[in-house]
């Protein structure tokens, strides 16, 4: 689509007083891409979005939208639309007036306004609500109006600040798919802020995970899941997240293992030809999800370490059951114990015998 | 047991009435009874010495129509309201918009604007009496620097009423500013940001977003300002006593003079009734007219 624009951030920094809220962040959202800024609260993701929008001024760095340097341009001249967490609908205006607000301000002719309103209302199923006030709408409907206001201007870039956080779980799931399909259909370059990793994983072309104002890792969702760049990423992505644990054989390394990669066997007496010695553990808790069950096991000298194991169906393991945990060597991730960054895949070779390899 | 059932049914009602009692007693004794008594008195002649009040019907109201001071004070009051209400509301809004922004020392500014409200009217009147004093008052001293002649602001019929209006605006604007400021602070900043992103300039945001959202506050402030304009009396008592030549006689001051200087209580009661009717009509009119334009969440 010719209207699509890319977004580039070049070492963007925002300081409040002395401490940086956003610290030298560089990223690129390609035209038509859905980029999700993910991170815990206070990591600087919303501030980054506001900097792109021009609602806050940056302390350092440059921002380009569609190849144009917009760093010093006011929000209105950046050709962007934005959906706010609170929706920011004008309470004194009807749904139609809310959607048309920007077009009226920009003096778009009346005939075209009506045409675009009909188009947006049809796309979002708002046809019968156009005369209502925002206070007469449900949360989901308000959300749609906010989306309508964002798309009606046909801006090539859309920014979304946790747009689904005020909806209930069911509706959130529905809107997630709707926003994604809308974004793909219209080819809008989108920067989407969320603290919900499920949302990020399911919607994004590119996930940028932030922590304390810096980017921890940027890449497609599969990469963040399969090869987390740091122990922070490993802990943040996935439900439940990756198990991080230590073994006495490798004291300077934190080991990571996805719950679905753990092989669990009940430790019955007798020889086990398939599985090696493994880790002796004890079932501490089971969390049943329907399709699968997450079994929390404790191990170590004083049972101070924990390992979540994802098992299909209902596991039926009573608390206290002794179990044995094993894994394939290629499923094991290694992180530096102090700095937290990912270590090369071969770092464990010759230093630590995998339980599975020992058979 | 039937007794107990009756008791348990009555108990909530008794509790309710007991809780209401203090407010009801105060309102009845000091608001409703005097209002009804005034209406009653206005239909009777003023008792004098051995001659008790007797029913005269609408005679007091007929006398009012022929009373030139009544008409003058009513006209003065209309001018006073027209001169003070829009101005003080507009200034209040401007000040609120200004001190709501990110400016240096805004707390001090807010305090400064609010100070006149905290002063008693009598003190304010005395301060301004000094400002207006011909010859050595503050205003004449400042004007004197530019070689302008002395003016008797409160002493000439042309300037006396405007002079009182200035004092009223000075005192009221800060009070109304507080309401506007509270409303502005309650307004989510994202509304402004959303409007900004849609390309609206400052004036456009003010006209199409801020002002409509301030309408409930404006209605409240307007009703209060109008009522205040028709209740003003302390200022007149301290500064001009209605003079010169009734140029600053406002309705309530006229009532005060008739009632407590000439002791014509029957006529004063009739004047009071008219004043109350005027206020009620104005208040209802504003609510009905503006309510259609006001958005309530």
Image (cartoon, grey):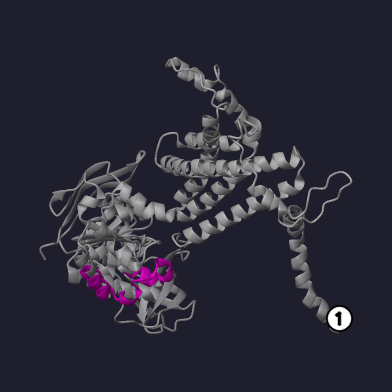
In terms of image quadrants, where is residue A345?
A: bottom left
* Residue A313 at least partly seen: yes
Q: Residue at x 43, y 53 (%)?
A: B187
Q: Secondary structure at mark 1?
A: helix
Q: Position of residue B255 (x, y in %)?
A: 68, 43
Q: In which quadrant of the rendered image does the N terminus of chain B lie?
A: bottom right
In terms of image quadrants, where is residue B90?
A: top left
Residue that label 1 marks = B3
Q: Position of residue A102 (x, y in %)?
A: 26, 59
Whether residue B215 is in magenta: the answer is: no
Reply above or below: B170 against A21.
above
Q: Residue at x 82, y 51 (%)?
A: B53
Reply above or below: B211 against A285.
above
Q: Residue at x 21, y 52 (%)?
A: A78
Reply above or below: B77 against A195.
above
Q: Which residues are magenta?
A: A115-144
């Amino acid at each position: 689509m010719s209207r699509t624009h890319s977004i580039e951030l070049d070492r963007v920094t925002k300081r409040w007083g002395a401490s940086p809220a956003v610290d030298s962040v560089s990223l690129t959202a390609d035209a038509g891409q859905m980029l999700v800024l993910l991170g815990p609260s206070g990591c600087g993701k919303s501030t980054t979005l506001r900097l792109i929008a021009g609602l806050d001024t940056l302390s350092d760095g440059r921002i380009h939208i569609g190849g144009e340097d917009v760093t010093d341009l006011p929000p209105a001249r950046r050709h962007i639309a934005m959906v706010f967490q609170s929706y920011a609908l004008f309470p004194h205006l009807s749904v139609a007036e809310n959607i048309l607000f920007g077009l009226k301000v920009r003096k778009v002719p009346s005939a075209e306004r009506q045409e675009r309103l009909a188009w947006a209302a049809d796309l979002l199923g708002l046809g019968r609500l156009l005369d209502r006030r925002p206070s007469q709408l449900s949360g989901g409907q308000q959300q749609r109006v906010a989306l309508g206001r964002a798309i009606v201007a046909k801006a090539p870039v859309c920014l979304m600040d946790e747009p689904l956080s005020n909806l209930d779980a069911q509706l959130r799931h529905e809107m997630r798919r709707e926003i994604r399909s809308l974004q793909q259909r219209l080819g809008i370059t989108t920067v989407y802020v969320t603290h919900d990793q499920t949302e990020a994983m399911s919607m994004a072309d590119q996930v940028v995970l932030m922590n304390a104002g810096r980017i921890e890792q940027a890449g497609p969702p599969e990469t963040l899941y399969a090869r987390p760049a740091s122990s922070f990423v490993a802990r943040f992505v996935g439900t439940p997240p990756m198990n991080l644990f230590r073994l006495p054989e490798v004291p300077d390394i934190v080991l990571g293992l996805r719950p679905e990669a753990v092989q669990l066997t009940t430790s019955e007496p007798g020889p086990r030809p398939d599985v090696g010695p493994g880790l002796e553990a004890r079932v501490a808790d089971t969390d049943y999800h329907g399709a699968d069950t997450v079994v929390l096991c404790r191990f170590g000298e004083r049972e101070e370490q924990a390992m979540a194991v994802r098992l299909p169906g209902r596991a039926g393991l009573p608390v206290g059951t002794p179990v044995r945990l094993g894994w394939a060597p290629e499923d094991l991730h290694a992180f530096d114990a102090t700095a937290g960054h990912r270590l090369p895949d071969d770092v464990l070779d010759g230093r630590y015998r995998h339980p599975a390899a020992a058979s | 047991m039937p007794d107990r059932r009756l008791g348990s049914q009555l108990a909530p009602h008794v509790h309710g009435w007991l809780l209401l009692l203090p407010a009801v007693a105060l309102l009845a004794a000091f608001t409703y009874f005097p209002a009804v008594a005034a209406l009653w008195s206005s239909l009777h002649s003023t008792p004098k010495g051995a001659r008790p009040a007797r029913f005269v019907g609408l005679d007091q109201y007929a006398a009012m129509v022929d009373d030139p001071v009544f008409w003058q004070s009513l006209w003065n009051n209309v001018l006073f309201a027209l001169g003070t209400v829009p101005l003080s509301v507009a200034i209040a809004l401007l000040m609120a918009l200004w001190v709501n922004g990110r400016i240096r020392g805004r707390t001090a500014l807010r305090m400064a604007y609010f100070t006149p409200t905290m002063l008693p009217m009598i003190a304010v009147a005395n301060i301004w009496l000094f400002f207006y004093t011909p010859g050595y008052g503050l205003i004449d001293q400042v004007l004197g620097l530019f070689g302008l002649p002395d003016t008797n602001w409160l002493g000439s019929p042309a300037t006396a009423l405007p002079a009182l209006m200035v004092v009223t605006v000075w005192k009221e604007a800060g009070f109304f500013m507080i309401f506007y400021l509270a409303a502005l602070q309650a307004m989510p900043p994202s509304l402004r940001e959303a409007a900004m992103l849609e390309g609206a300039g400052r004036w456009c945001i003010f006209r199409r977003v801020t002002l409509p959202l301030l309408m409930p506050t404006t209605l409240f402030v307007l009703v209060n300002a109008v009522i205040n304009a028709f209740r003003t009396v302390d200022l007149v008592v301290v500064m001009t006593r209605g003079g010169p030549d009734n140029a600053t006689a406002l309705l309530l001051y006229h009532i005060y003079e008739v009632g407590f200087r000439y002791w014509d209580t029957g006529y004063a009661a009739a004047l009071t009734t008219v004043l109350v009717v005027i206020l009620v009509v104005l208040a209802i009119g504003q609510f009905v007219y503006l309510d259609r334009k006001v958005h309530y969440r």
